Amino acid sequence: MSVTSPAPVPETVPGLGDRLLRRVLAGAEAEVGDPLCPLRHSVRLEERHGRPVAWPDWVPTTVVDALRTAGVRQPWSHQVEGAELAHAGRDVVVATGTASGKSLVYQLPVLTRFASDRRATALYLSPTKALAADQLRALNALDIPDVRATCVDGDTPAEERDWARRNARWIHSNPDMLHRSILPRHASWATFLRRLSYVVVDECHTYRGVFGSHVALLLRRLLRVAARYGSRPTIVLASATVADPGPFATVLTGRDVTAVTDDGSPRSARTVALWEPPLLPELTGENLAPVRRPAGAEASRMLADLVVEGARTLAFVRSRRGAELTAMGARRLLADAAPDLCSRVESYRGGYLPEERRELESALARGQLLGVASTNALELGMDIAGLDAVVVAGFPGTRASFWQQAGRAGRAAEEALVVLVARDDPMDTYLVHHPDALLGAPVERCVLDPTNPYVLAPHLACAAAELPLTAADLDTDGVFAGTPAAAVLDALVDDGVLRKRPTGWFWPSTQDMPAGSVDIRGSGLGQIALVESGTGRMLGTVDAASAPATAHPGAVYLHRGESYVVESLDLDAGLALVHAETPDWRTDARSTADVEIVAELSRSEHGPVTVSFGETCVTTQVVGYQRRAPDGRILETVPLDMPEQNLETRAVWYTIDDSALADAGILPARIPGALHAAEHAAIGLLPLFAICDRWDIGGMSTALHPQTGLPTVFVHDGHPGGAGLAERGHGVLAEWLGATRAAIAECGCRTGCPSCVQSPKCGNGNNPLDKAGAIVVLDLVIAALRTS
């Protein structure tokens, strides 16, 4: 792999990736070497040859013949290595590249077990319905007798679920269905659970943060119930992008897991381009900051150009609204250049109704769609073959997700193109100017914390409702060993949630089950339904925690290219009413935040700088929203009176002596703007060091915090109890702030812009901000840390 800056596109074009890159450059009316050319860097990932090995002798001939008929002539080395471990009853995680055939690692031992034990069963769990359905299609295509595989998820009709309970041997499902339906009703699944031989956890790197902590405890609940019926299933985990896969999988499952990481599969060549959209000199943004051409608009243009070229293209966009807008923009461009192709471009995102998802997935599988703008719903979804190009509109928050999305390209083509289009964001700007931080660095560590009491408590209640908890569940060999379960159970008893008897802890009701009220994917507050007021038609859902910012009165909501405006939001009723409208503006919410220190868990002094980590209470309130024109101009700021939301979480913070700031040239009048700018940029760069998104974290800065009595900068987790993100930032503070300082200093703007110190979620309207002062502040903190 080689990196050049800027990247020359060769005169002799060797492959499809370079040809498509030329097309993208031509569409931008840019030439390599021009200082205004948006292509910052390119890298060519060379072809890798595979290492085939012989089929294991324990695999039945019927299984080998079926796989050969499906096109698998020989397995790759890592497939057999992982399958051998699983066949021997060892828990294993296979962490090899996208499209490396990880499914064979669990198919071989499961199908072999099915052949030798006609009563054995298996459970496959994936984070998305699309992926589970796709894996089921691939399994059924093998046409192996008596596998009896089926899908059980929220879209499965009741009669099909009944059939699955009685007859299915291999259930394809997701954590949500396991949590809400299978485990609470485990008695009706007793036959399946008694014979459970394997549990497959696919795309395990998605189980991080709070969601990962929920899934870790959910898996412990599953193993506990399975043990009640006499089974101890072997666990097989798979991921294309996870650092330290063995330790991570051990925390996720509570078992010792062996990692397989030596990828023996082939890989086609790919050209990866880093693209920074140009500044728009005729426009200014908030506080007269310079504005770049939006990444979504750039992705629309690229998507249209590549579709015209005949390249099957997937554009990944950060938000649901962005996916809709990108597809709409591409269709508008195609309406002029190639009208017959408009119908072959669509959007795909979460929140669609089941029948809409199935329709789009089918069109994708058939190749009917040539261009698709998607959220990360397709990052882990269907096994889409033959993609010629992937456009990533905005860094997806982690290197792991970027490579997962990039891996969608080049599965069947000789060569493919991957383009990362930078947003107006500190992280994106840093990466396109520091390619080694993306292309030459390992993926991030997955962070999860199953000991978080805010996550542990509801799962202990669910576990007690499934089977009464005993002291054996908490001891060194129990599934909840290593967690503060005893203290949390005492609190649940004091609150009347559980009852304590000499034999253990019990759920007091025989009717109501707690699982239905525990949201394992979101904030725990459930979902808000978006309903069209005139017709009563349900359009989709949004997470209740984000609803005040995304579904407030006056917010613009997009659904499959149609625009709606929110009329009202009732958080208690879980309902937002909308009506169809196509305004010529979009909306961005504005909020305020205050941070109270509850407990200081760690403190270190470095001369004039003190660094702390601990428990905090963050109070936030959405106080208004801005109406913005398509080019980013602010048309109007509208006040809102939304309820305050209190978040008990964890944070990292540092304080600086006033005298040190004064000695560095930061007088009192400049302190608020300098700290504010440093805080914004730090939030933008934390995803470089921990798997998270800037929307998973928050912050606050103040020239005089009432508890510290000093200028203070906080960065906190955005989830109850914390998700380990601020703790990770605390552990790599010097490196994190060093990257933050570089991102600010290397940005070409004069006084601050969205690429360095402005934040899209700042409740103060990005005011005050002092870019130069932020550099001084960070220099002071970094020097203090290094000196000590």
Image (spheres, grey):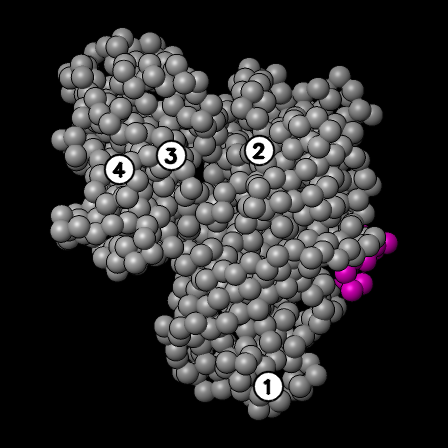
* Vertical relation: 538 (above or below) 213: above
Say which element carries label 1.
helix
Disc number lying in front (1 or 2)? 2
Q: Is residue 478 visible?
A: no
| Residue 335 as seen in the image, left or right of residue 240 | right
Q: Position of residue 289 (x, y in %)?
A: 77, 62
| Residue 661 badge | 1
| Type of amino acid at the residue the image marks with label 2 | Gly
Q: Residue furthest right?
A: 282
Q: Earlier in the sequence, mark 1 or mark 4?
A: 4
Q: Is residue 41 above or below residue 722?
A: above
Residue where numbered disc 2 is placed: 351
Residue 516 or 434: which is nearer the viewer?
A: 516
User: Where is mark 4, residue-wise?
Assistant: 466
The picture places residue 746, in percent across and down from the top left corner, at 64, 65
The foreground one among 382 and 650 is 650
Span colored in magenta = 279-290
Say whether marks 3 and 4 touch (CB < 8 Å). no
Using a 10 Å C-alpha cutoff, classify the residue at mark 3 as few (fewer than 14 neighbours), some (14 to 19) or many (20 or more).
many
